Image (tube, grey):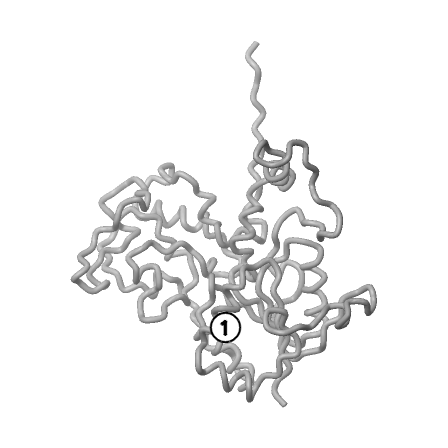
Amino acid sequence: MGVKTSLEWLSSCAGCEISLLNIGEALVPILTEHLEIVHAPVIMDHKYYGQCGDQGLHLQLPEATVGIITGGVANEEHLEVLEEMRKKCAILIALGSCATQGGIPALMNGQDSSASFDAVYRTPSTDPGAVRPNQIVPQLFDRTYALDEKVKIDLQLPGCPPNPAHIAEVIISLLENRPPNLPTKSVCDTCPTRREGKGAVDQVKRFVENAEFDPAQPISEMRCLLEQGFVCMGPVTAAGCAKRGAPSCIEARVPCRGCYGPVLPRGNQMLDMMNALASNGIDTKSVVDRRSMLRFSGAHGNLRPKKKVAVKEEA
């Protein structure tokens, strides 16, 4: 018998599950010889309240040695599932940036939830005067939370989606009873592009124009995108996306978007990135939407609704 393993998904898109499948042939012996999947809604029919859905008033999950959860916590059902997983699993792993930092779902944290519902359910494009759903559907929280804001998490593996090789490394390290060998540096630390010091521009460039590079030359001959004036999040983003050598976005000559979250678990990518821009001689006032730097890490209180500024009426 293999190690009993339970998988769950909360506020997520299934990209992490696809990444798990992308481990490829190496996944076959892991699943057939080393793991015993006892619960996984994405691949097996296992009900929360018994197979007929009528056993008890509280959801029940099987006990497992390892629990892997993707997605953040956005409503009451998510929290109930998460707490049950924590109760039944000896080791709990947060897989993907939604689970570790809130991810894309945490973009909702930047606006008032009531205003969001009004925009969806009470606009001319819908039914005028439609009411917010309040029956059957789980109660939505005030914001989307990362898993470690609600329960103790034993291991975090970020990424949108996570690197398949690192998912395999985490599973194998658990089987071998050793710490996983995972990246600890930033994207910038692993980037092979050429650096010449402060860039020649003092204003942020929007990525509606191509970066300067010679497609016939290796990526090591392209000048650092941050030095070219683009908002490349590499200095403040955890490494791990590289599959062939260079970080994935950089490999495509595109600035890093920050999808692996901050280098430090509770870091603030927006604040750190503004400092990185300033240190490169770029006017931070030229950044059109600095809050977008938190597009993958809006949990932990980083992204909040803007405070309304009172407008004084003229006498």
Question: Is 47 placed left or right of 126 in the picture?
Answer: right
Please state which of residues 221 and 3 is positioned toward the viewer in this rendering: 3
Q: Position of residue 235 (x, y in %)?
A: 37, 57
Q: Secondary structure at mark 1?
A: helix
Q: Position of residue 303 (x, y in %)?
A: 54, 46
Write down the quadrant of residue 6 in the picture: bottom right
Point out the residue furthest to the top here: 315
Question: Is 157 placed left or right of 1 in the picture?
Answer: left
Residue drawn at 56 percent across, 22 percent down: 311
Q: Quadrant of the C terminus?
A: top right
* Vertical side of 250 occupied by 310: above or below: above
Identify the amino acid type marked 1: Leu
Question: Is 153 placed left or right of 161 in the picture?
Answer: right
Residue drawn at 52 percent across, 56 percent down: 103
The residue carrying mark 1 is: 20
Residue drawn at 33 percent across, 54 percent down: 255
Question: How many marks are shown on the rendered structure?
Answer: 1
Residue drawn at 32 percent across, 55 percent down: 254
Q: Quadrant of the N terminus?
A: bottom right
Q: Position of residue 180 (x, y in %)?
A: 49, 77
Please state which of residues 135 and 74 is positioned toward the viewer in this rendering: 135
